[in-house]
Amino acid sequence: MRIVSLLVLLTCGSFIILPKPAQVIHIPLTVKTGYGPFYPAYGYLSPVDYDDPVWGKCILPVRNKPVRWQKTSLSRIDLDLFQFLYQNTRAGRVSEKDFRSLFNKWKVLFNPVSYPVKPIKCYVYVVTGYDPDRQRNAVLIDTNNNLDFSDETPVYPEKRKPMDFDYHPQEAQIIHYQQLQNGKPADMTAPLVIKELNGELCYSIPLYGVARFNTGGHDYTLLASSLFSRTDFKESQLVVQTSSIETDKIDPKLVIDQGEYVQLGNHTYKFSGVDLNKGVLTLEPVDAAKEHFLQVGLPFSHFTATNVINGKPIITSTYKGKYLFIDFWGTWCQGCVEAMPKLKHLYPQTDRTKIEFISVACHDNRERLKAFINKNSLTWPQVFSSPSLKFEDRYHVKGFPRYVLINPEGTIIWQGVGVADLPEQLATLKLLRSR
């Protein structure tokens, strides 16, 4: 399976269990079938690799694969990848060295309390092939998880329609599996959808969570996605319901990744994820006045600095009432330098009564920055993030370049790592000068 994980890395040779944060809000979560307000996502049904030095030993023997099918292959969907790795390590199929290496690679905090000691059915096996009788690609799913395909009915996947955003229950096969609930393994079911996309077989698990939360006298409906490739919600996303209809699709730009922040009224919270063992969605209150976020939908925390070009002060709060484009970059950064001519070409086209540009050079050298500015004739305000300012740390900038666009009210409305779609953004907001 092609799976990407984004939890928190807190390991250093050995696994460290962190203490619970001082303030954590656990909100009861109900899991529903369907995609809710999220757009569907699919994972590829990749064949198992018996020769893989780590995963090859974890493949269980299955019985009664179709004998008449052609080009058959066996796939496994790991519904809880971390649990699957843990129990195979305990069984001796995966070495402790590989176990630590993979958890480090995935940036996952290992907490043994979250994993049952005895193995559970946290996977489902699938056979794919070509059925000559039907002359179509075919799939057999071990829906009852007994490792025997003789009691299963073939599925003939339809080609996925590009704009098919709805959940159609008749398309789903109900799979049986196990997961930890209230500290004990529990028998569960979930829908599994198989479709053909660009000639490849793909799968999706339409599950999302709903949590109701009241803060500041207002009720909010929070909706969580499992990313539709697993059932464990250990990697999840969040949206705040804005429509009276729970399944109305939401702008993907408003989707909040695990570890990012959500503004609910006058309060800001970190979305810490979903814990299905406890049946909760977790938020951590943060002090927005002390934290500095570069996240769409949140207010930009203003700064004061000096313009390297003319020595005059730059106070970003004085730009209130105008749009502000901020570029976090460095002369050492190849991607940043390559993008600079595009910004230089775009800047004279902007309506300066409506928007201003500011570039903030990070991890840099003042003299090298001045030389670059002079050589390339940059004319918009330039800031040097000195060791005393450390804007890259203050705003948690990990990758460069990093661009943000702030509206006249001081809210971040766009962010990116490239400027390809910036002209379109500015044109849409009517921030370019009339020709």
Image (spheres, rainbow, N blue to C red):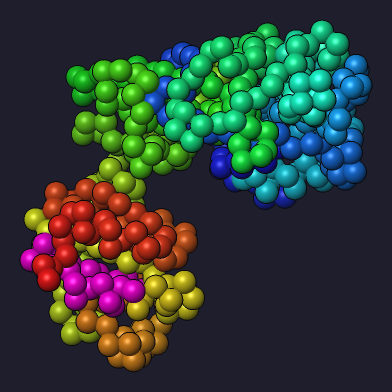
Q: Name the quarter where the C terminus is drawn.
A: bottom left
Compared across the picture, whether 368 is left or right of 186 comes to: left
Compared across the picture, whether 50 is left or right of 193 comes to: right
- In magenta, the rendered stretch is 342-362
Front residue of 56 and 251: 251
Tell me if residue 345 is in the magenta stretch. yes
Image location (x, y in percent) of residue 412: 26, 50
Front residue of 45 and 405: 45
Residue visible at 34% across and 91% down in the picture: 375
Q: Is residue 372 among what the camera can see?
A: yes
> Image quadrant of residue 302?
bottom left
Compared across the picture, whether 384 is left or right of 348 comes to: right
The answer to whether residue 251 is above or below residue 132 is: below
Tell me if residue 291 is in the magenta stretch. no
Image location (x, y in percent) of residue 345: 28, 77
Q: Is residue 23 among what the camera can see?
A: no
Residue visible at 19% across and 19% down in the picture: 217
> Image quadrant of residue 339?
bottom left
Q: Name the quarter where the N terminus is drawn.
A: top right
Image location (x, y in percent) of residue 131: 80, 24
